[in-house]
Image (tube, grey):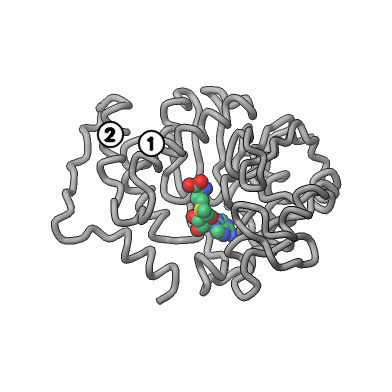
Amino acid sequence: MTWASRIARLLRPTAGDHVPSPPPPDADLEARIAYQIECLPQHYLPGIGIGDFIQEGEDLVRLLSSLGGLVTDDTVLDMGCGLGRVAIPLQRVLHRGSYSGFDIVPEIVHWNSVNISGVTASFAFHHLDVRNSTYNPDGRLEPGNASFPYADHSFSFAFATSLFSHLLADGTQRYLEELRRVLRPNGRAVLTFFLLNDEVESRAECGDTDIEFPQRWDHGRLNHPDRPEDAVAYDWPWLLGLIEGLGFEVHSLHWGRWSGHTDGLSYQDVLVLRSP
Ligand SMILES: C[S@@+](CC[C@H](N)C(=O)[O-])C[C@H]1O[C@@H](n2cnc3c(N)ncnc32)[C@H](O)[C@@H]1O
């Protein structure tokens, strides 16, 4: 069974699932959020409690505000949005702004569209049929040829949490080019990565990181050589060259807990960029 068909099965309500009724069109924000949380397919989150899913999402939103300066009227892009983990709490922040998220798993985009856009009209979701050996093995487009479905300079703020850890070099380059195209001048981006500097590289080589990257590869390390897009770590100097070559300014870099930085603000490394 492919990962996509496993997700499709997990997102389907199972017998005995409580199916909540949508709130009335004029329901207040907290009632809409409560409805979305109630709709979450519990069996989709194996191994992580619902509390963790919600808590992690709220922590990520705090990070977007504190590190990236996200404000209420930003026009926001969420690349590889997943199942509303960040979009749901973000509704509390974007009172006067808007949100667009895209993902490559159609069932996830459908769930978000019905349960999030269905009750909060300023939130929209799009599907991109991009191949990924882990999430969408039969995708029509290679990540290196994908185009984001948005006009130039559409967004003031963009983020990607645990997306670039599933993209190989061609995809990462293309997604950063597309990010540069759709971000307005002076726009901000908060992106998470697994990054390797000399210190982290030696820890990874010894297997001394929380998620292991045993396999060296052209631009970094892989968690699993047979399934390269399961988890990808990048050499920081290579990524920095790419970012600066596109004209982005690195505003800040915050090392994450995965590599032993116990005081890290988040599990993955967080990179904050500013567009030219
Ligand atoms: C680990 S999940 C993170 C989801 C979400 N960002 C979050 O923090 O909850 C990785 C997500 O990236 C999506 N993804 C993988 N490759 C992608 C690509 N090339 N373009 C867009 N999304 C992709 C997957 O479908 C999955 O939803």
Which residue: 51% across, 42% down?
A: 100
Quickly name the residue at label 1: 121
Give the Cα distance between marks 1 and 2. Answer: 16 Å
Is 8 left or right of 168, judged from the image as shown? left
Mark 2: which amino acid?
Ala
Query: Residue 209 or 109: which is nearer the viewer?
Result: 209
* CB at disc 1 and ligand 1 closer than 8 Å: no
Residue 208 can be seen, yes or no = yes
User: SS of the residue at dot 1?
Assistant: loop
Which residue: 73% across, 53% down?
A: 203
Q: Quadrant of residue 218?
A: bottom right
| Label 2 CA crowd tier, 10 Å (few <14, some 14–19, many 20+) | few
Q: Position of residue 210 (x, y in %)?
A: 60, 52
Q: Position of residue 174 (x, y in %)?
A: 71, 57
Mark 1: which amino acid?
Ala
Is 77 left or right of 253, judged from the image as shown? left
Is 11 left or right of 123, judged from the image as shown? left
For the N terminus, which image quadrant? bottom left
Which residue: 65% across, 53% down?
A: 209
Query: Residue 112 or 89: which is nearer the viewer?
Result: 89
- Asked if residue 62 is positioned above or below residue 141 in the image, the reply reads above
How many callouts does the rendering have? 2
* CB at disc 2 and ligand 1 closer than 8 Å: no
Q: Position of residue 122 (x, y in %)?
A: 43, 34
Residue 102 can be seen, yes or no = no
- Asked if residue 186 is positioned above or below residue 180 in the image, the reply reads above
Quickly name the residue at label 2: 34
Is 202 left or right of 171, judged from the image as shown? right
User: SS of the residue at dot 2?
Assistant: helix
